[in-house]
Image (cartoon, rainbow, N blue to C red):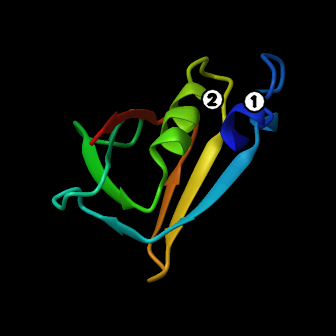
Amino acid sequence: GTALQAKRGSLTYPNDGATLIYEVSALDDGESDTPILELTGPGIQNRVDLGVRGLDETDARQIIESRCEFPLGTDVILTDISGRTACLPRSTRIKLRS
């Protein structure tokens, strides 16, 4: 998969990790029946649930795996067809709920 093959940086230069951009059908507040990314980490008070319609579950799991060795990892930008955007730096911890 794309996320697993993407450059994750090095301990010397963790900022050399790739930025992955995914266009999805819709981003919402996680209250629909779409797969939900549970987000925690710096800059997020408690937790944020992000509904992501159109992101394949395999891609979601690969994104999570590509970030499991912080400070190494990938930054992710999700954008939907309505122009909503979510930027998830590699410091954001992600769990998949469906």
What type is the residue that disc 1 sits on? Arg
Q: Is residue 26 above or below residue 29?
A: below
**Is residue 31 visible to us here?**
yes
Secondary structure category for the residue under label 2: loop
Residue 21, percent across and down?
65, 58
Q: Is residue 83 left or right of residue 37?
A: right
Residue 57, percent across and down?
45, 43
Using the image as rendered, state which of residue 92 and residue 4 is in the foreground.
4
Image quadrant occupied by the C terminus: top left
Asked if the residue at tag 2 contacts the one at tag 1, i.e. Cβ–Cβ closer than 8 Å, the answer is yes
Using the image as rendered, state which of residue 69 and residue 2 is in the foreground.
2
Residue found 44% across the figure and 62% down from its top: 54
Q: Residue furthest left?
A: 31
Residue 46, percent across and down?
22, 36
What type is the residue that disc 2 sits on? Ser
Using the image as rendered, state which of residue 81 and residue 39 is in the foreground.
81
Question: Residue 75: which numbered mark, if any?
Answer: none
Secondary structure category for the residue under label 1: loop
Q: Which residue is mark 2?
A: 66
Using the image as rendered, state which of residue 51 and residue 33 is in the foreground.
33
Q: Is residue 65 left or right of residue 37?
A: right
Number of other residues with Cα within 10 Å of mark 1, as a class: few under 14, some 14 to 19, many 20 or more: many
Residue found 57% across the figure and 34% down from its top: 62
Q: Which residue is mark 1?
A: 8
